[in-house]
Amino acid sequence: MEVKQAKITAVGHYLPEFRMTNFELEKLMDTNDEWIRTRTGISERRILKDPDKATAFMGAEAAKEALANANVDASEIDLVILATVTPDYLFPATACLVQNMIGATNAFAFDLSAACSGFLYALSTGSMYIEAGRAKKVLVIGSDKMSSILDYTDRTTSILFGDGAGAVLLEESSDGTGLIDQIHYTEGDTNCSLYQHAGGSRNPASKETVENKQHYITQDGRAVFKKATMGMADVSLEIMKKNNLDPEDVAWLVPHQANLRIIDATANRMG
């Protein structure tokens, strides 16, 4: 039996117009442009200012661009997977809202939540549907309105994150190229180095959680840095070794873009 292979045939993106620069952040907290650039390499981040638009809107715009680039009608899509940690609502799934917005009337849709790794998990899941013969065209979307869960008096988090969305169209490969391999790991004992305290079933929203700013994300920056650099480098080296590749064989490495220091440290660890 011939194994099907999934291939990215089109990409799309959406970025809000408003650019929040480091100089804008200087007005909100104790920080400055030099401090932020030195530690993160970041000079600006996009913010979705319209209060009537959120994660679904951005995801739909990215998906529409991907479909247009592939000259594919939304009615041809079999599945929509959306990775996010900032859904429009707890339910219905944001993917369902996107499905309706783009007119993918023949697709089923669901959300996937895996934080920074979310898009990769969604990409892997989408490819498996194609490989199993359960779908022919899959939209994989990553979309987040991180500004909705940021405390703009906390420079450990608010300087890092912005809003935006990306989308890819997956189809069965007809030329032998496509997604080759994947490796995933989870460390569940990370002592919540980066998390949102309230809003879930363990700590539901209340007057107290709002007053205590528990719906904003918090992080242990040093712990996240250590885990990110080690994990990204080690798994990249592992998958190259598994597929008999040397570093010089790789033309592009597309990392999670949390900040420049993490990317540089990852590259150095990989040699």
Image (cartoon, grey):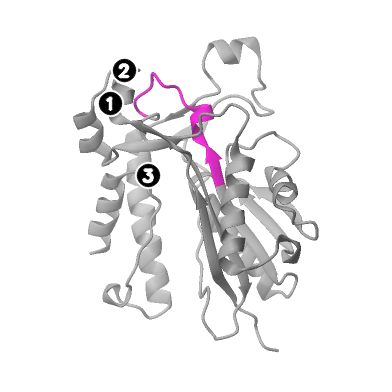
Residue farthest to the bottom, as pictured: 1
* Residue under numbered circle 3: 258
Residue 27 numbered tag: 2
Residue at 35% over, 17% down: 28
Amino acid residing under circle 3? Ala
Q: Are marks 1 and 2 in contact (CB under 8 Å)?
A: yes
Residue 149 lies within the magenta run: yes
Boundaries of the magenta span: 143-156
Q: Are marks 3 and 2 in contact (CB under 8 Å)?
A: no
The number of discs equals 3
Amino acid residing under circle 1? Phe
Callout 3 secondary element: loop
Q: CA distance from mark 1 to mark 2?
A: 7 Å
Mark 3 or 1: in front is: 1
* Residue under numbered circle 1: 23
Above or below, 120 against 38 in this view is below
Callout 2 secondary element: loop
Q: Are marks 3 and 1 in contact (CB under 8 Å)?
A: no
Q: CA distance from mark 3 to mark 2?
A: 23 Å
Closest to the observer: 231 or 88?
A: 88
Residue at 52% over, 28% down: 149
Residue at 55% over, 26% down: 197
Mark 3 or mark 1: whose residue is earlier in sequence: 1
* Viewer can see residue 87: yes
Mark 3 or mark 2: whose residue is earlier in sequence: 2
Amino acid residing under circle 2? Lys
